[in-house]
Structures are given as structure tokens and as C-alpha cells.
Amino acid sequence: MENILELRNLTKSYPKSGFTLEQVTFSLPYGSILGFVGENGAGKTTTIGCILNTVRKDSGTVKIFGKEMGDADTDIREKIGVVYDGDNFPGFWTAKQLSKVMEGLYKNWDQALFQKYLEDFQLPANQKIKRYSKGMTMKLAIAAALSHHPELLILDEATGGLDPVMRDDMLDVFLEFVQEENHSILLSSHITSDLEKVADYITFIHNGRLILTAAKDDLVYRYAVMRCRESQFQALDREDILAYRKRDMQIDVLVADGGKAQGKYKDVVVDHASVDEIMLLLVKGERA
Amino acid sequence: MRGLIRNNFYTTLAGAKTFAGIAVLTGIFVVAMDNAVPSLVIGYMLLVMIGFSLNSIVGISKESTSKWGKYKLTAPVKKGDIVKSFFVSQLLWLAVGIAFAGVGVALSVALHGCPFDRDTDIFILFVAGTGISLFMGAIFFPLYFLGGEERHEVILVISLLGGIGVIMGLVTLINMIYPGRQTARQIVLNGIFMTACSAAAFAASCLLSVGVFQRREM
């Protein structure tokens, strides 16, 4: 078994809003971090809902630890840690009360580890959660998700409310988590710079459809943006173009292999592409 | 289940503390007053039994202010157990209410004598308080899980009034079947019948709520 999480042709429709998650297929190998990127309303949270069974899928399969998870599969959920964006826990609780509740929910709840996280993250145990800052509530959620020794972490915009310093600290925690070869993380985020730092794979979703899944190193080191004039653009081989976007006098063209493009089109400027730029071109650009 | 019960306990704790304070102060007042006219004792008994149950039910709606309701579904618990835990919690808080009512009426009787025509009246008051509480929960939970998060205040009022209405209906029915003055034995049997009806409705509502919650998406 190579993948901790496998989605095959996952489909979910919301007739009232007209939104459809279409045939979503991707997998998360053991020991890796998969960045799940997309704009608001692209379908990230719906996909995560289908994975976690909080949303009923219409069709397709979702396998976690090689098995489809039903309501009765509590043993699988023991091995999953979840962090949602925003307030994960009732604000009128304290971290201490949260710990007592979690202790009753998870067989492997590690009180000492949770206490250590509270100290490391400087979270007062007896203060009501509603008195925490947004960053503190996110850190508490991450601490809670890690304190029952999960093997799979599913983080839905978990770093969204954190400042850059805190985010960096959390990313270190995630990297430490995946040092165990049977641990993996599905990290949904808008903040593509975070994914560039930690993700092994990145999947882009747009309007309910996956538009690209690639190894991060390929995206960062191989994918590139060619800055073309109109005449240069017309001369390009259509097969080389993943997406393009017209900007004033220039056309930005996303290519899968910058080195090859540089050799093939010598008079065109080829820049490295950030994950942000790739996402913008894929979402806002046109396909050849 | 232990974690879920603890979760429900912490969710209702703040409200329960406040209500317990009021119940103690009101209890002292009721016990101190002469009970020749028993309306204060009757009111106190019903207030504490229904009040603690009501507070337990209100707690569930407080969870919707965060993503905790959704988060719980990702924990190693079955959806059915989440629903059952709310019913169990309500029963536990009802037991607390019954204890308060019991202590209050016992002290009042000890200090001032029995304020009722017959001892069985006290039993019937416990039956009424328990019945209203159980019917209230039986009406509230399925409606709430059917999507009443935004309308929980209205559902709560409907449930409370519904609970009172059903118990009054049952009393009317019994009085129609047994017109005239009932014997103590008849009163006790009727009380047991009313409690059995309340318990059956509560249990049926639990099964219905589990079914509704299983199909719910968050």
C-alpha cells in the first residue's frame, strides 16, 4: 500500500448552488505533504468533507489507509487529525476542558504531549478559547490535532490566520510530523508560499475540477513562464503551452519544461514560475 | 460516549451553574415560606425539573457558533452516538432537576407539613415535570437535526409548549377515562402510564433523531 489517501473520480453536486465537484482524482503517498490549492469556492472544503465523511459523495471512491471510511470505522478516524479554518472549538471552553473532552474521544489522546504543545505555543490552559487571538486558536487546533498521535493530518486552511513567523513555526511542526515515514499531510491553503516551503506534491482545483497535480520540485524547477510578444506567441508550438494570459503588450505562457522551452525558443524570455503564478495562469489564463 | 457526555457537560455547564444558583435561592425562599397555599412548591418543582432539562437542550445550539459540530464528526465516534449523547445528557440534567425538586419539597414538607390534599399529588408533580421535560426533548431534537440550527429558539419554544400541551392532553384523557375522584392506586397507575408514554416518546425520538442525523451533511 503506497498511498495513505486515494481519491478516484470523486463527484459531488449541489443542485441549489449549481456547484459540482467533478471526477476528482488524486492520491497522497505515505510520508509526504500534498498541497491542495484553489481559490475560494473551488471545491477544496467539499473535497475534504467527502474525505472525512462530513459530506456525502455522489459517486467515486475515497480510500484512507486503503479502506473506504464509513460511520462505523472509528479506528480509521483515530488515526486522522483535522484542523479547520476559524473556530474549531466552542469559545466558552478552556484548553484544559478541551483536553478532557478529547481524552474521552480519542483512545490515544496524549495529555502530556498536549500540555507540551500548550507550553511550546504559549497557550494558557485555563483561559477561555474565545479570549485567544485567531493565531492562538489555530495553534490550539493544531496542538489538538497532533496530540492523539495521528498518521494523517488534514488541514483545511490551517495556516490562514497566522502571521508569517507563526506560520513558519507551524510549517516546521508539519515537517517534523512527516519525518515519520507513515505520516502524511493533506494541506489545503491559499497561501502558496507555505506550500512551496513544505509540500511534496501540489494539486490545483478550480471550479470543482482538478486542473493540475504535480511534484512541487517539478513546479518550482521545471515549470516556467515565457514572456512573449504577440508574434512570438503565434510562433509557439501549441503543444508546449499549458496556459496563457494576455497582459497589455505581453503574453505570459506557462510551460511544463522551462529548460526545454529556453532551448527551443531562444529569443523569448523564460522565467521561473512561482506556485502563485502557476495558479493564476491556470485559473485565469486560457488553454491552448 | 464518555467524551461526548463530557463535551455536553462542558457545553451546558455555564448555564447550569447560573440556573443552579437561581434554583438554590428560589428553593430557600420557597422552603422558608408557609406552604398552606401550595402554588409556590408546585411552581418550584416544575421550574427546576423543566429548567435543568431546558438548559441541557439549549447547550446543543451553542455548539453551532463554532465548527465543533463538524469537527466531532471527524473524531472516532459514530454519528448515532453523538445524537444519543444529547439524549443521555438531558436525562442526567433531568435527574439533577428531580433531585433539586425532591430536596425542595422534602424540606418544605418537613418544616410546614404536606401542602397537598393527598400525598400522591407530589408524585403526580414529579410525573408532570418529568413528562414535560421528556416530551420537550422528544420534540426538540429531531426538529433541530432536520436543519433547525437557525431557528433553534423557535423550535425550543415549540418544544416546551408542545411538552406542556402533550402532558395536559394526557391528563385530560385520563380524567375523561376516570371521571370523578380517583383512588390513590389509580393516580399512581396513571402516573406510571404518563411516565411510560413520555419515556416511549423520548426513546422513539432518539431513534428518529439518529436517522435524521445520519443523513445530515456539515
Image (spheres, coloured by chain):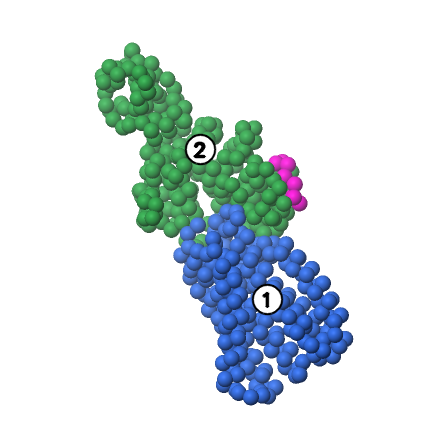
Label 1 sits on what residue type? Ile
User: Looking at the picture, do discs 1 and 2 lie on one chain?
Assistant: no
Left or right: A194, with B130 as reference point? left
Give the residue drawn at x 34%, y 38%: A207
Range of the magenta residues?
Answer: A120-127
Label 2 sits on what residue type? His
- Which of the 4 image quarters holds residue B190? bottom right
- Which of the 4 image quarters holds residue A163? top right
Between circles 1 and 2, the one closer to the viewer is 1
Identify the secondary structure beneath mark 1. Answer: helix
Residue B50, numbered circle: 1
Q: Residues within 10 Å of mark 2 (few under 14, many from 20)?
A: many
Mark 2, residue position: A190
Q: What hue represents chain A? A: green
Relative image position of residue B87 (x, y in whole percent):
53, 63
Give the residue drawn at x 69%, y 77%: B37
Residue A231, numbered circle: none
Relative image position of residue A87 (x, y in whole percent):
53, 43
In-front residue for pair A202/A44: A44
